[in-house]
Amino acid sequence: MRCFAGASSALDFSSPSLLSSYRIRRRQLGGIGRRLVMNSVSSQARSRDSGGYDDGVVTEEEWGRWGAVSPLPAAVKQIVNDLKVLELKVNAQIEFGGNGGKLQGAFGAYEDKKHRATYEALEDPEKKFRFFSARQVACRLLGSRGYLCQKCWLAMEDCMCANVKPCDLWKRIRFWLYMHPRDFLRQNNTGKLLWQVFGVHSASLCIFGIAEDEEIMWDEFKRAGKSHVRCLYPNQNSELTLSVENAFGDSTSENPGSSMGDEDSTLHFILLDGTWNNSAAMLKRLKDHAKTVWGDEDLPCISLTTGASAMHKLRPQPSWDRTCTAAAAIGLLSELSLLPQLSSYGLDKQADAVEEALVVLLDSLTGRRLRMGRSITRKVRNTINIC
């Protein structure tokens, strides 16, 4: 996937994708539980599948295991239930496969018509958007059961969890992974590394368009105040986009960086976890909400001097100031660690911890591609810095 410093996401092996390698090994969800038909899935994975899920129902516990901090979204739960009812009605199993693990077969064709009709019947654009997001999440939850590890989002035979070392993030910083629903549960997503390393309460998932997630995030922003919220976005032409040094480098009382040692001065950093095209819509939604909360849409942004990350080995980015989500976090922590007032908080070590996890992910994805006989190099694009 295509990412950039601060508004970024993971790699997307889109031609073909990692998930498309399972095109002939589809995953089916029966009426009384999920049935795996992938020959490559181990007996251990099958054991996890039968023991960790409740007859196709998505529980609060399962939702939390995927990295969520919010309660199970009502719209997601409703769509999962609707899919189960529809499965019985059409007497065809829910089947996932193909590029992106989409609904397949007779059930997929019928459900596609039904959900499009539901979408068109919604007159309110906000309701349309929320329906789209909830359906994306619901289908990805069902399609990943018993197939992906719930912590690292990799296929179970490629699980990297044992090689990721947890690390405490400095308590005055909190990351928010504002993730597009199409990036949720993608194996090559790097944003997930932040909560794997720092924990879900230091690096929290917020899915774009999921009401419960966005409410939790904005409640925290309201408590912190506008001056303690920053969005990483490389829009260097904007007067509101500052470098880390310009944003936090001076020691004046008006500068949030000058009081970050205080108990009530946590800085919240938003990382846009989606494609370059999707990030524009995500930023607009943030600005619209900022206007509702604070009276103007001027959401303070910062840009980084981050160069290419390790993930460029598999997927070159459109320009050098765009990188994966994890690399954006690494760059931010590294630049903050250079500020005199923040140099004693171990931010450089915390950046190193994320970088180590990123290398582990890269090794896992590379090993998988090699086993499947796929290339591990990508053709370098003609890059132009458009920011």
Image (cartoon, helix red, strand yellow):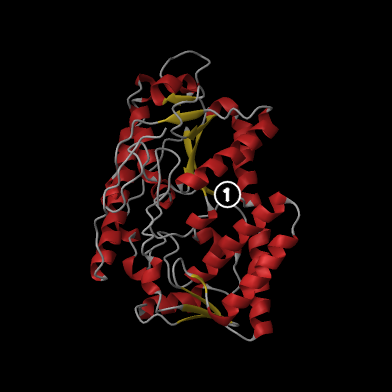
Marks counted in the figure total 1
Whether residue 55 is visible, yes or no, is no
Residue drawn at x 40%, y 59% as measured from the top left? 152
Q: Position of residue 39 (x, y in %)?
A: 36, 82
Q: Please, which residue is most extreme toward the bottom here? A: 91
Q: Which residue is mark 1?
A: 208
What is the three-letter code of the residue carrying label 1? Phe
Q: Please, which residue is most extreme toward the top here? A: 252
Q: Secondary structure at mark 1?
A: loop
Residue drawn at x 61%, y 41% as measured from the top left? 285
Q: Position of residue 45 (x, y in %)?
A: 40, 75
Tell whether 157 sits left or right of 48.
left
Q: Position of residue 191 (x, y in %)?
A: 43, 49
Vertical relation: 32 (above or below) 154? below
Q: Position of residue 314 (x, y in %)?
A: 28, 54
Tell whether 49 sits left or right of 328.
right
The one nearer the camera, 273 or 364, is 273
Whether residue 3 is visible, yes or no, is yes
Vertical relation: 380 (above or below) 85? above
